[in-house]
Amino acid sequence: MHTFTGPERREADRASDPAPVPATLPGPVPRRRDGAPVRRDPWVAVAVVAALGALAGWLLPAAAIDWQPALAWREPWRWWTAAFVHWSPLHLAANLAGAVLVGTFGRAAQVPPRVALAWLAAWPLAQLALLAQPALAHYGGLSGVLHAGVAAAACWLAAAQRGRRRAIGVAVLAALAAKVALERPWAAPLTHPPGWDIAVAPLAHAAGALAGLACTLAALALRRRPPRHRE
């Protein structure tokens, strides 16, 4: 029987220890097309919040959370929650599908977090712009917020990308502008498009698109501002 001395015992103990488990698995780190590492996507998070909020809003009394100009300043949560109100199953289903499409569009466009924040900032602005139409006593729906998302992602492509990606952004912005113009948001507070079982507020679409465009341009301008040098 062999008796280990002090140094021999330490070497034997070290040899019997299990091999350390690496903190991360070997392999290349996933990266975006622009070279940045892939992280959780805040754009998709905003789209998920919009969809889940719409589902939750379906279970709540509309009068407590919809847009009402008379309550806009006294109950400011309506700037957000009005997007969660839907007036029919078709209205809800269409906007849930729209949330999936806008989330997918922004994901494919690989918008940076600041553009997702711009979309989030445009959310309440799209509702506040409805103050321009006081005859719109009640409003609910995600469509204004979704128009803001389309405008934000397309603006990012048109302003910050090149080649085919920029062309796609310009084309989407042009199509969005044509859609808003054809809806004539200045004509009446509500319209009744064929095939819909609810009235539509064209101003909400125009307000959302303009808010998304403005917030994204502001986010891009702030990013490009040169840092100040102290004397």
Image (spheres, grey):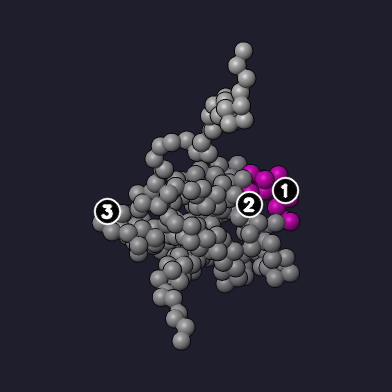
Give 27 or 101, whichever is nearer the viewer.
27
- Mark 1 crowd level (few <14, some 14–19, many ≥20, 10 Å Cα): few
Residue hosting label 3: 164
Residue drawn at point x = 53 percent, y = 29 percent: 19
Mark 3 to mark 1: distance in Å? Answer: 44 Å
Residue drawn at point x = 51 percent, y = 48 percent: 40
Amino acid type assigned to the residue bearing label 1 in the image: Leu
Residue 220 on image: x %, y %? 42, 67
Residue hosting label 1: 60
Mark 1 to mark 2: distance in Å? Answer: 9 Å
- N-terminal of the pair, mark 2 or mark 3, is 2
| Element type where label 3 sits in the image | helix
Residue hosting label 2: 84
Main secondary structure type of the part rendered in magenta = helix
Residue 208 located within the stretch drawn in magenta: no
Give 118 or 7, whichever is nearer the viewer.
7
Residue reaching furthest left? 163
| Element type where label 1 sits in the image | loop
Asked if residue 79 shows in the view, the reply is: yes
- N-terminal of the pair, mark 1 or mark 2, is 1
Residue contact at pointers 1 and 2, CB within 8 angstroms: yes
Give 174 or 197, whichever is nearer the viewer.
174
- Mark 3 crowd level (few <14, some 14–19, many ≥20, 10 Å Cα): few
Magenta region: which residues? Answer: 53-64
Residue reaching furthest bottom? 231
